[in-house]
Image (cartoon, grey):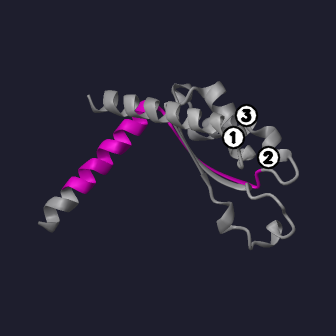
Amino acid sequence: MLQKHVRAWTSRATRQLSTMASSATSNTPMEDAIRAKITEALKPTTLEIFNDSHKHAHHQPMVGSTSKETHFRLVITSDAFRSKMQPARHRIVYQLLESELAREGGIHALQLRTMTPEEELRRKEQELQKSTSSTAEAS
């Protein structure tokens, strides 16, 4: 039951974000490229993209870089990851983003959390149990 609600909410949120992104001129071309490639190839039920570039702008390798999109954290849930170990899942994503990783001023760092829908559901249930038990202990 919870899984059904999570999927429905994720689907609605994804459609809303896609509509918003396509209706405005983008200031985030790298993030848009990441979103487009992953969405097309993996059909994710969850895709969260965090641009952490501002946290690393002062690092030596970033000196002189004009790009504001170099460090990303991705959370991807997809059936395409079923029966694949984490290294294989990560290789899939790296292959999809090969040109963005190789490009001058492109992606410098990529942190990935890849899950199947079942793994995501288990994680959410565990988080819910932890928060419920923490609340009960505090009372």
Which stretch did the figure color magenta?
Answer: 107-132
Give residue 41's mark: none
What numbered label is drawn on residue 101?
Answer: 2
The mark that comes first in sequence, 2 or 1, is 1
15 to the left or right of 4: right
For disc 3, the marked residue is 96
Say which quadrant the C terminus sits in. bottom left
Rendered position, 108 above or below 119: below
Callout 1 amino acid: Asp
Q: Mark 2: few, some, or many residues within 10 Å (few <14, many ≥20)?
A: some
Residue density around tag 3, few if under 14, some if 14–19, many if 20 or more, within 10 Å: some
Q: Who comes first in sequence, dot 3 or dot 2?
A: 3
Give the dominant element type of the magenta stretch: helix, strand or loop: helix
In magenta segment, residue 53: no
Density class for disc 1 (Cα within 10 Å; few <14, some 14-19, many ≥20) is some
Q: Which residue is mark 1?
A: 32
Q: Position of residue 81 (x, y in %)?
A: 55, 30
The quarter of the picture where the N terminus appears is: top left
Q: Earlier in the sequence, mark 3 or mark 1?
A: 1
CA gap, disc 3 and disc 2: 10 Å
- Type of amino acid at the residue the image marks with label 3: Leu
Q: Is residue 135 left or right of residue 24?
A: left
